[in-house]
Every structure is written in C-alpha cells, then in structure tokens.
C-alpha cells in the first residue's frame, strides 16, 4: 500500500490535535500514520451499492449504516484507527469518545483497492477482530468475490467465498444482499 512516510509515531492525544486530511484516507496503525489515495471509482460504486442494499432493508432508527467518513478507534496505545469502507451498527451499541467511534460494529464491509495488498487487508481484519467485530465481508472487485469472515476464538476466520448468491448478515437476518447487485454496471 502506498503511504506517506512518517518521522515518528503519534500518540492518541497528538493525533486528536492534527488537522483532517482531505481527498485521502488516513488510518493510524500502531502509531504510524498511513495516508492512501482516494479509492478508484469502481471501489466507491461497490460501497454505494452495498450501502443502498443494506440501508433499504433496516430500520434506520435502530440501525446505523456508515460509510468511510469516520474513524474507528481500535486501541489508544499504541494508537490504531481504521476507516472501514462500510460499517453496520445496532445504534444501541455505538460508543463515541472525542468524536470517534470506540465500539465494534456488528458488520464491516471492506473492498479491496488497487493500492492494497492481501497483507494490508489481513492486518486490517486482525484489527477488527481485536475490537470484537463479529462479521466482515471482504469484496474483491478483481476476482468478483465476497469472502465472509466470522469471529471465532478471537480471530476473524473465513467461512465462505461467494461469486453469486445472497449475503445475509448474521446480526441482521432480515437483510438480503444479492451479490450480482453490488458490482458496477
């Protein structure tokens, strides 16, 4: 993953005082700031399609569907903050501190970007597991697959890789996402 090099790592308190970055995604992993370019068009279209599918099937008073416009605090020391492509929360479980989410969503959806490696995604998924995220969908536009992972014994483990069919989140069984509907036209 192409990132801007850092001279040093940052603490939670230092990071809170930093200006926001525009036109890029900023994450912090073990105190190291990682800035990546904005995702390519198809990446955004896939996220939008999944968002539309899920948001149309949940009660928005009880469920929050959030896209990559928020920081998810994994841990304060060493600081790790992730920016999921899409996260689905039961509203009653959301904890916010200093303007950032500090609680695990019930579902995270990640879409591989051109700048990401498999190792980058595995590192991100491990962070989600450490926070206690029970389910992650990893979408590969190149392979046109969705890998479904469930939390088990402290790790997010793959349970299936799908090319077609219907996705149903464990915590939101009323939601049905047709895999064919997530791909750009």
Image (cartoon, rainbow, N blue to C red):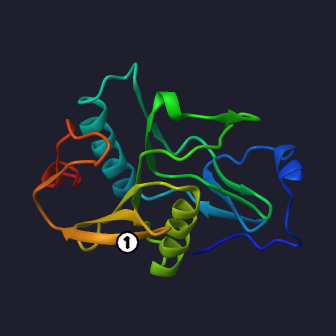
Q: Which residue is situated farthest in the top direction here?
A: 61
Pick the front one: 62 or 84: 62
Quadrant in which residue 137 is drawn: bottom left
| Residue under the point 88% across and 73% down | 7
**How many discs mark residues in the rendered view?**
1
From what the image shows, is residue 61 above or below residue 143? Answer: above
Direction from residue 170 to residue 73 in the image, left or right: right
Q: Which residue is situated farthest in the left direction here?
A: 165
Q: Residues within 10 Å of mark 1 (few under 14, many from 20)?
A: some
| Residue under the point 77% across and 74% down | 5
Image coordinates for residue 184, horizontal then vertical, percent: 23, 53
Direction from residue 118 to residue 3 in the image, left or right: right
- Is residue 175 in view from this perspective? yes
**Mark 1: which secondary structure?**
strand
From what the image shows, is residue 128 above or below residue 123? Answer: above
Image coordinates for residue 130, horizontal then vertical, percent: 58, 63
Pick the front one: 41 or 83: 83
- Is residue 116 in view from this perspective? no
Image coordinates for residue 148, horizontal then vertical, percent: 29, 63
The quarter in which the N terminus is drawn is: bottom right
Pick the front one: 4 or 153: 153
| Residue under the point 83% across and 51% down | 15
Quadrant in which residue 90 is drawn: top left
From what the image shows, is residue 31 above or below residue 108? Answer: below
Image coordinates for residue 117, horizontal then vertical, percent: 48, 78
The residue that mark 1 highlights is 157
Q: Which residue is situated farthest in the front direction here?
A: 153
């Amino acid at each position: 993953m192409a990132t801007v090099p850092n001279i040093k790592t940052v603490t939670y308190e230092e990071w809170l005082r930093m200006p926001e970055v525009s036109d890029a995604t900023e994450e912090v992993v073990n105190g190291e700031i990682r800035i990546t370019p904005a995702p390519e068009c198809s990446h955004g279209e896939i996220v939008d399609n999944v968002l539309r599918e899920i948001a149309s099937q949940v009660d928005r008073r009880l469920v929050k569907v959030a896209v990559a416009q928020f920081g998810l605090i994994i841990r304060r020391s060493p600081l790790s903050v992730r920016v999921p492509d899409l996260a689905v929360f039961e509203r009653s479980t959301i904890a916010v501190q200093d303007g950032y989410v500090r609680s695990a969503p019930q579902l995270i959806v990640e879409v591989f970007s051109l700048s990401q490696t498999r190792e980058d995604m595995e590192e991100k998924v491990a962070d989600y597991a450490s926070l206690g995220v029970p389910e992650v969908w990893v979408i590969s536009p190149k392979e046109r697959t969705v890998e479904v992972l469930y939390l088990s014994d402290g790790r997010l483990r793959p349970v299936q890789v799908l090319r077609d069919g219907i996705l149903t989140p464990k915590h939101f069984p009323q939601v049905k996402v047709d895999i064919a509907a997530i791909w750009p036209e």
